[in-house]
Image: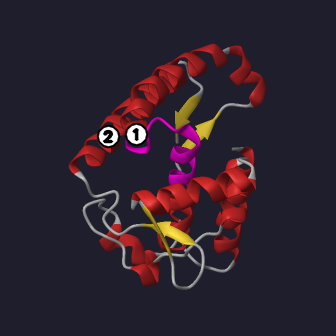
């Protein structure tokens, strides 16, 4: 996942360098140093573990408890809309209730997904074929893959997203309480 974070940071810097507004540039959180984090790292790990135990089952049921598929779907979804999310055009699409038109999505290939997830490329290719067969992912006519329109607009997934949000806020509260993060 470090490669995914590194890639996102580089893309965020690139969008800032080109004058394009970056939605991530508006952060107002100050994170402690690594040495300060180590002093209270168990607090974070405990809360993160609790969070993952709450949210992973809700998502993984949609992919027959296949965690590599789940990781691929999340990487694919983020990659498909990354450019849109980094622009001022994202406003009408900030709600999960609204489908993003294909022209605003950037298809991803198996190699880029493998690079961002750390999964072997052959595993990604095989899982993508399974996801296409299941109807959750489509092959884009421009090349590559993207999520099927409407794939994330189901009531079940909407409920899972909200449950994930609440679980993540519990992690954030614990980090704030432990003074691992400050709001500036």
Is residue 61 found inside the magenta-colored segment of the image? no
Q: Considering depth in this image, is 113 or 161 the residue closer to the camera?
A: 113
Q: Quadrant of the N terminus?
A: top right
- Seen at 29% across and 61% down, the residue is 95
Q: Nearer the viewer, mark 2 or mark 1?
A: 1
Image location of residue 45, percent across then percent down: 60, 20
Considering every residue shown, the one lying at the far right of the view is: 35
Please report the residue visible at 32 percent of the width from the left and 35 percent of the height from the top: 163
Quadrant housing residue 37: top right
Q: Residue at x 57, y 15 (%)?
A: 43
Residue 119: where, in percent of width, then height?
A: 71, 47
Q: Please state the extent of the stretch shown in magenta in the rendering.
A: 62-75
Q: Residue furthest left?
A: 155
User: Callout 1: helix, strand or loop?
Assistant: helix
Residue bearing mark 1: 59
Image check: 179 left or right of 155? right
Q: Nearer the viewer, residue 122 or 99?
A: 122
- Which one is in front, 45 or 143? 143
Magenta stretch: helix, strand or loop mostly: helix
Dot 2: what SS? helix
State the image quarter where residue 21 is shown: bottom right
| Lateral position of residue 176 relative to residue 124, left or right | left
> What residue did someone put label 2 on?
160
Instruction: Answer with left or right where residue 163 lies relative to residue 10.
Output: left
Which residue appears at 47% of the width and 30% of the height?
Answer: 172
């Amino acid at each position: 996942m470090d490669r995914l974070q590194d890639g996102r940071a580089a893309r965020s810097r690139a969008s800032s360098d080109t004058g394009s507004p970056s939605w991530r540039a508006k952060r107002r959180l100050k994170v402690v140093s690594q040495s300060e984090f180590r002093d209270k790292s168990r607090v974070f790990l405990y809360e993160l573990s609790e969070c993952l135990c709450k949210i992973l089952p809700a998502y993984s049921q949609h992919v027959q408890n296949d965690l590599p598929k789940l990781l691929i779907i999340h990487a694919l979804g983020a990659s498909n809309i990354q450019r849109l999310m980094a622009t001022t055009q994202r406003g009408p699409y900030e709600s999960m209730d609204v489908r993003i038109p294909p022209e605003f999505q950037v298809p991803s290939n198996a190699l880029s997904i493998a690079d961002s997830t750390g999964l072997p490329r052959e595993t990604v290719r095989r899982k993508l074929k399974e996801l296409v067969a299941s109807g959750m992912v489509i092959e884009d006519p421009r090349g590559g893959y993207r999520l099927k329109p409407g794939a994330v607009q189901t009531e079940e997934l909407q409920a899972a997203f909200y449950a994930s949000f609440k679980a993540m806020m519990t992690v954030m509260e614990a980090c704030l309480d432990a003074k691992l993060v400050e709001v500036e």
